[in-house]
Image: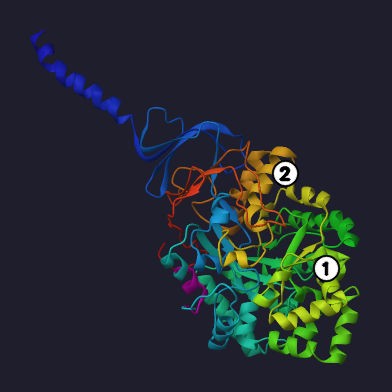
Amino acid sequence: MKILSNLLPYVILFFCMIGCSNQETFDMLIKNGQIADGTGQPIFTGDIGINADTIAAVGNLENAKGRQEIDATGLTVAPGFINMLSWATESLIVDGKSESDIRQGVTLEVMGEGWSMGPLNDEMRQLEQSSQKDVKYRIEWTTLGEYLEFLEKRGIAPNVASFVGATTLRVHELGEANRPPTPAELENMKALAKTAMEEGAMGIGSSLIYAPAFYADTEELIELCKVASAHDGMYISHMRSEGDYWLEAIDELIRIAKEANIPAEIYHLKAGGKDNWGKWESAIAKIDSARAAGLQITTDMYNYTAGATGLDASMPPWVQEGGYGKWAERLQDPAIRKKVIEEMKAKGDGWENLYFAAGSPEKLILNDFRNDSLRHLTGKTLGEVARIRGTSPEETAIDLVVQDSSRVGTVYFLMSEENVKKQIALPYMSFGSDAGSLAPVKPFTNSSPHPRAYGNVARLLGKYVRDEKVIPLEEAVYKLSGLPASNLKIKKRGALATGNYADLAIFDANTIIDKATFDEPHQFAEGMVHVFVNGDQVLKNGEHTGATPGRVVRGPGWKGNN
């Protein structure tokens, strides 16, 4: 008995050690959340432990402790959301907090719709520097990879990634000329694409309704996409048409995917113009057929019936050849001006005429001017401005482009609400804002952005998921996280799984909603409570913490060490 008595303290210590080892301690413990893990599987109640920048555990962690803890009872815990079409290229330079997107749970901004921030040559750099509007910055990079690293070093709240722009590659070698590249120029474009892929670009991005991108033929795009394919990247495109030639444009994208042996995504899938709304079934049949044949064709969208671009999308590409200077010069020639007006009034002959597709100048809202003297027109329709000036809508559009020394930012009402809902339900649909990430402060308030900049994700989760029940919440979360991460071949992001980076969006599914409108766009969405990026909390109880832990996320062709 004496021996047992002497051993008793050691036995107690042994069992205490066993018990203590079961009580894990995490840097951050999120308890009792409704976990939508990004895979599309049913939501379950559970806990998440985070250590440093990594998810260390997911499940029942009732015996665990956290150096910091969040009680997520009644809240949905999801992977951070991926914005598949971001134009935060400049806004992040001015304000790295990325508030309009962080307040919706967006933790990765994917850029590069046709134009990317590299590679640049001296002429391109000078032109970009001189054409800056309210957002002023010094261009301190040459390649796309250098730009992304510049953002990371500067300090940004979200992670960033980018496609390399087919337009950028073309301008680098041809300027804004309307001709095919010479064999030597094409080889140079391909070499630049290869460098970008090795720097971590996600693939090739195009925007084919705009000059000078419009001047590229299908064969040129195939050759560039072969380079991306060799580096396991993808092709993503604002197609040559989203209206009168929509079906033909889908055929072109499918051909590029097949001949370049590359996955392809359609940017902001839509049928623009009432005459084209009925093409929806035929368009989806083409995509589904290509997918059934083994091609990886996917899509993304913004959740509104209006798009936003410029008045350049209302004028024929031939008048824009050579860049803005030549365009403005031609518009002041009476004979050319007359011809442009005639073409604006008709269906585009081989080009996408958004003015004609909108059906009325009352469906064009002017939302972004360069010159202070014209900013009083912000938020007015083209029809209103035409009446104020006593000129036709076509003449007014031409005058504004010349007077503002810009393409003039414009919102076009083009789409059907019924089709928007059908698109959301597509199994291969992701989401992109097609906008910057802003805040209701200058210089951002100098323009009136499309409300999608402040509300695209929240509108999906509030209006279409909760209120209209177009798709279940777990499916929406998957389409905002796991699906785009898989399409981009991003590792360790897009799902709440042990070993993944700790990018999280924690929100109230009962209250999340977009507040931005076309009349008052500078309004943050509501309902996002906490957001983490790489384990750092950037949103706490609905307020930005000021943290800027964002990193460059690189594609599978990256030749770096990580």
Measure the C-alpha gap from mark 1 to mark 2. 32 Å
- SS class, disc 1: helix
Q: Nearer the viewer, residue 268 or 370?
A: 370
Q: Which residue is mark 2?
A: 464
Q: Is residue 178 visible?
A: no
Looking at marks 1 and 2 on the same chain, the residue that comes earlier in the sequence is marked by 1
- Compared with 302, 32 (above or below) is above
Magenta range:
141-149
Residue 146 colored magenta? yes
Does the image show residue 380? yes
Q: Amino acid at mark 2?
A: Tyr
In this rendering, position of residue 35 left or right of residue 407: left
Percent of width and height locating residue 510: 63, 36
Magenta segment includes 115: no
Residue 322's x, y, as percent? 71, 88
Q: Nearer the viewer, residue 135 or 75?
A: 135
View extreme (left): residue? 2
Circles 1 and 2, Cβ within 8 Å, touching? The answer is no
Front residue of this view, candidates 268 and 249: 268
Q: Main secondary structure of the magenta part?
A: helix
